[in-house]
Image (tube, rainbow, N blue to C red):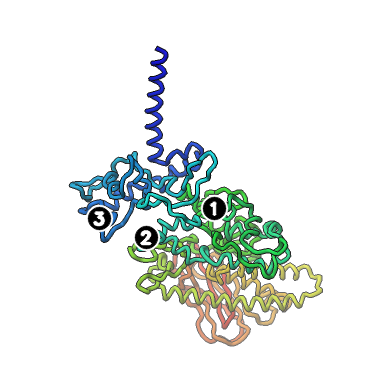
Amino acid sequence: MKNKLHLFLWIATFFCSTFLADVLFAQQSNCQYCHSNESGLWGSSKHANTQTDVANELAANWAGQAPDSVISGSQAEDCLSCHAPRAVTMKGGMTETQAMGYYFSTVNGKFTASTGAINTSDWPHVTCESCHNPPANHPTSGRPALGAYNSKTLSYDAVQTTNELCGQCHGNLKFVGTDHRIYNAWKMSRHGHKGQADLAGELAASHTGQTPDQVIAGEDCIACHAPTSVNLKGGMTEAQALGNFFSTSNGTFTSSTATADTLNWPNVSCITCHDPHNPNAISYFNSTTKTYTVMNSSNELCGQCHGNLRFQGTDHLSYNIDSGSGGKGIPDVHSMNAQCVDCHMYKTLIDGTNSKNYKGHSWSVFIKEPDGSVVSSCTKCHATMTADSSMIYVTKWKTEFQNLDSVANAKVTAAQNMLTGSKDSTKIKSLQDAIYNMTYAEKDESHGVHNHLYSSLLLNSAIDKANNIITGVDINDSSKPLVFGLSQNYPNPFNPTTKINFTIPRTGNVTLKVYDILGKEVAVLVNGFVNSGKYSVNFKNAEALSSGIYFYRLKEGNLTQVRKMVLLK
């Protein structure tokens, strides 16, 4: 009786374990036993939910076609190869054509408009072993290598980097004619090229005589320029990665420091912003802790490196300028309620266009389409604009910023020279604020395009403060000599009329215009030749405008000032 019970338990255990193993293999092999965290993340990701997408594609575009037409016909679209490459290994092995017929319903051997997913418990999705090639001695000692499982050859295609792995299906590395071209767009962007050469130049110019450890302790360039490099070669510290990818002499960087091991340099890789086991979530890879942090927004992700969210002392402050705060003695001016990705990850739903195929991963505001035309992300919010008119605005803003920045630098330099050896704490503080605002505007690195009005306020403030030091009087002091200046409107808030005072030190062509929060011109108060002097104008055309924030800008030659006012009805 005891032996029979043991035999029964052995048989039951064998069948249960075989069934469980089969189901687990169908979903994600047996990796979850040792990699439960990664397995759990994978289970809720897009990589673990691919069969429905394929079924919908077959029903929409392949009705009347047989499975072999989908896999190898004249218009073939080998969806198995990316959506479930390990499907061919199930049930003792199948061809891709057989797998298509096994996993998706047909009528008389052909797909129909009602085609749906079948045998779903066997469908493996993009399983662990689609991207990881486990050796025969795994898990006892052998580590899996990166590899793209090839459903035609039933073997792994070797890849050098995770970027190349992602590019098999999210780019044209496997299928030249694919319309999934995120990898290709990434390669064109600064995230995908030039990063190593730029960093080598920075090390040679500014870190000669320093060791990799000293550079990382002071300016952790790996953290933003190639954070996932610490995962290579079995794992490295940030300092070790810096020493691996850039040449040194006796352990220190020199003026001749150059790139090294360029083949493995990952740039800002796909897995910097996408946890490969949880690609749905916007995540940031921290090269110090070698862990991912899920971000609350795309702006928060961008702000880690293009702002001071990760490093307070960084000189990359686009995120901060966009937020429109942090200046000394000027009001906050928020941007147009746009996220970074609204302008820099523009994508449409028009088939065949790069603006769709790239899915924003060129990060370019202007995108060249296959037919040679150019589209702009500006048109997403400004329907009346074209790519050409968008470029005119961008060029105009850059030119205005450059001119204003030149004036600010000249004025601040003159103020610095005047205060050499001075102990006047008030003027020294004013100079410090002027330098801060001018430098803050320059650290945006968009040359005035990001939050143009706020950048103008920062530079105008620097000019005002420097002028105050040079002339010895405040810009609003009525006894001072004529200095280019724009006063705050009064009353403010206002309804429906407000007065604006301004001063012109020289005769010239002057404009005074009013803009809404989106930068659209809503009124022209002055436009013509004006003699030097002090002026007041009334803004009387506010009746048709809605309540909100408006900006008014005074311009004469290379001089520009901008201030904010509020219409409150």
Q: Is residue 244 above or below residue 19?
A: below
Please report contact status of discs 1 and 3: CB closer than 8 Å, yes or no: no
Identity of the residue furthest to the top in this view: 1
**CA gap, disc 3 and disc 2:** 16 Å
Please tell me how crowded label 3 is: few (under 14), some (14-19), or many (20+) other residues with Cα within 10 Å. some
Name the kind of residue labelled 2 in the image. Answer: Phe
The residue identified by callout 1 is 284
Instruction: Tell me where residue 98 appears, x and y as whole percent.
Output: 28, 47
Q: Amino acid at mark 3?
A: Ser
Q: Quadrant of residue 212?
A: bottom right
Where residue 341 appears, as percent x and y from the top left, is 47, 60
Q: Determine which of the numbered discs, if any, sits on residue 175 in the image.
A: 2
Q: Quadrant of residue 509?
A: bottom right
Spatial distance from mark 1 to mark 3, Cα to Cα? 41 Å
Q: Is residue 433 in view from this perspective?
A: no
The N terminus sits in image quarter: top left
Where disc 3 sits, the SS reads: helix
Of badges 1 and 3, nearer the viewer stands 3
Please tell me whether residue 194 is drawn above or below residue 82 in the rendered image.
below
- Residue 519 appears in the rendering: yes
Please, what is the three-letter code of the amino acid marked with disc 1?
Answer: Tyr
Give me the disc on residue 69.
Answer: 3
The residues tagged by marks 1 and 2 sit, at their Cα atoms, a distance apart of 29 Å
Q: Nearer the viewer, mark 1 or mark 2?
A: 2
Q: Residue at x 50, y 78 (%)?
A: 525
